[in-house]
Image (spheres, grey):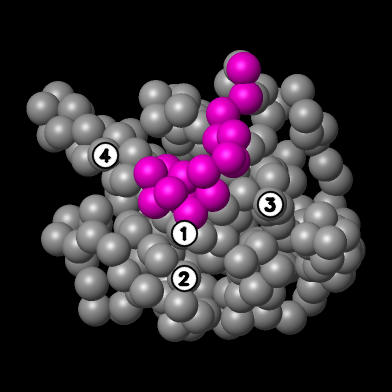
Amino acid sequence: MKIEALATLAQELGKCQACHLRQDALAPVGWYGNPNSPLVIVGEGPGGQEDDYGCPLIGPSGQLLDKALWATKMTRDRILTTNIIKCRPKGNRTPSVEEGAFCAKIWLEKELAIIQPKVIVALGSVAMHYLIDPTLKITKQRGLWFKTEDGFDCIATYHPSYLLRLSGHDQVAAKWDVFHDLEAARAKAAAACPNYNFQSDNPIDLFALFAKRQKIN
Ligand code: URA
């Protein structure tokens, strides 16, 4: 049921021309993973490699996320990853609050309505501001539990791109914060779905699953 409904939504997303961001992207980037997962990770939006391959969080940020997921006994094929915004903003700039809200209302909200996750992890402040509250600060409110407007349990953590910009002690400390946030998210999702398997035997090589794509008009 969820698989078919999300597949239909993905086909509609492929045709989206609802805003100006579409013009500079090869094509929209949807979700990847298991639609039956009780845990969903919501990032900001596609970067260059995500646009090239049509997979969320496949580039450097995604690779760091995969390491953190493996450390917390999860793999990308067993959870579901998606983004607030589906088309790469030109020059990889951070999407505005309005752009994020416009896109998320059309696509992310429908994805979440189908998936009905037990837990959402907001990756970074763009996702935290949309899903929880635009006045929150990621450095202050990450690691705390909130309810989204639609009643989903949601925790925010640092975006991996932020971790990649840090160095030394700051980077180590922030990586531990992410580790603990992901552990807390997994524990809450596992409490709701005790028989769900969050981890495959091996980490997933997304580049082996996705081919480079061409611009779709
Ligand atoms: N950063 C995100 O938040 N999402 C992606 O898909 C890629 C980078």
* Type of amino acid under label 4: His
Secondary structure type for disc 2? loop
Q: Earlier in the sequence, mark 2 or mark 3?
A: 3
Q: CA distance from mark 2 to mark 3?
A: 15 Å
Q: Amino acid at mark 3?
A: Asn
User: Which label sits on residue 42?
Assistant: none
Q: Nearer the viewer, mark 4 or mark 3?
A: 3
Q: Amino acid at mark 2?
A: Phe
- Along the horizontal axis of the image, is 43 left or right of 11? left
Residue at image location 50% in from the left, 80% down from the top = 150
Name the residue type under label 1.
Ile
Q: Is mark 2 within 8 Å of ligand 1?
A: no
Residue 180 numbered tag: 4
What's the CA distance linking mark 1 and mark 3?
13 Å
Of residues 17 and 132, the one nearer the viewer is 132
> Quadrant of residue 163 in the image?
top left
The magenta segment: 186-201
The residue that mark 3 highlights is 36
Cβ atoms at labels 1 and 2 below 8 Å apart: yes
- Where residue 53 appears, x then y in whole percent? 73, 40
For disc 1, the marked residue is 120
Direction from residue 118 to residue 26 in the image, left or right? right
Look at the image and tell me in which quarter the C terminus lies.
bottom right
Q: Residues within 10 Å of mark 1 (few under 14, many from 20)?
A: many
Q: Residues within 10 Å of mark 2 (few under 14, many from 20)?
A: some
Which mark is first along the chain, 3 or 4?
3
Q: Is residue 186 left or right of residue 30?
A: left
Q: Quadrant of the N terminus?
A: bottom right
Residue 152's label in the rendered image is 2
Distance from disc 1 to disc 2, alpha carbons, whole Å, reads 7 Å
The reply to whether residue 31 is in sight is yes
SS at circle 1: strand
